Amino acid sequence: MPIELHAFDTPNGRKISIALEEMALPYTVRIVDIGKGQQFDAEFLKISPNGKIPAIIDTEGPGGRPVSVFESGAILIYLGEKTGRFWPRDLAARIPVLEWLMFQHGGFGPIAGQVHHFATVENEADRRYGLERFSNETRRLYAVMDRRLATHRFFADEPSIADFAIVGWVWRHPRHKVDLAEFPNVRRWYETMLARPGVERGFAVKLR
């Protein structure tokens, strides 16, 4: 049975559609329209208590029993464990995957998401302060990634779930008001990722 992906057209939703395509897992999509508040519907809250997308239901989970997973990082790790792909078995090789996955979840996603928010604030004073604060930090995070990618083709030694997590957010670089020409290593990595057939399919999936 295919995995059910409950998602919307956001960076966090895209990272899971990309992972599912890259891992060649069959899945169906159930769009959760966050613009209409569907993330707070009682049925969705049963599988995502925090009322956030994405979430998945795997009818063939551990022991052959159905399981639901919420939080995109947890989903990526679960899928890596399930397939053995893009998730190293060797602990030393797994460390950078975990580091950069946590980098995205703890910094690059939340901070860049604040840029998305403050760019739409109507009050000029509120917008100016918030946008300057979070834009500066977002650019710092791009610089951190650029330094890493100056010596690594991917964030770990091989393509991994960390790359899937981050590419969904770099995808929104125009909304971050970031020109990737200023971060050439990030641009090279991003173009490499977009050229992967699984990533291309993951971005093409209808999530809206």
Image (spheres, rainbow, N blue to C red):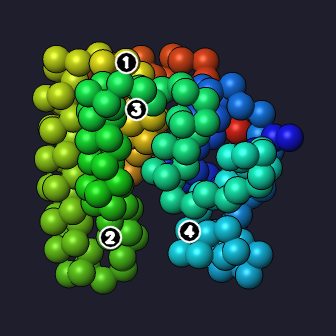
Which residue in the structure is indicated by mark 2? Answer: 118
Q: Label 4 sits on what residue type?
A: Lys
Do the numbered discs 1 and 3 sit on residues whose CB atoms are within 8 Å? no
Q: Is residue 4 visible?
A: no
Q: Nearer the viewer, residue 170 or 94?
A: 94
Label whose residue precedes the other's in the sequence (1 or 2): 2
Q: CA distance from mark 2 to mark 4?
A: 20 Å
Q: Nearer the viewer, residue 41 or 79?
A: 79
Q: Label 3 sits on what residue type?
A: Asp
Which residue in the structure is indicated by mark 4? Answer: 52
- Above or below for 142 versus 75: above
Q: CA distance from mark 3 to mark 2?
A: 26 Å
Q: Label 1 sits on what residue type?
A: Glu
Q: CA distance from mark 1 to mark 2?
A: 35 Å
Label whose residue precedes the other's in the sequence (2 or 4): 4
Label whose residue precedes the other's in the sequence (3 or 4): 4
The answer to whether 80 appears left or right of 42 in the picture is left
For disc 1, the neighbor class at 10 Å (few under 14, some 14 to 19, many from 20) is some
Which residue in the structure is indicated by mark 3? Answer: 163
For disc 4, the neighbor class at 10 Å (few under 14, some 14 to 19, many from 20) is many
Give the SS element for disc 4: loop
The answer to whether 150 appears left or right of 53 in the picture is left
The answer to whether 26 appears left or right of 109 in the picture is right
Q: CA distance from mark 3 to mark 4?
A: 21 Å
- Identify the mark at residue 158; answer none if there is no mark: 1
For disc 2, the neighbor class at 10 Å (few under 14, some 14 to 19, many from 20) is many
Q: Is residue 164 visible?
A: yes
- Above or below for 28 versus 47: above
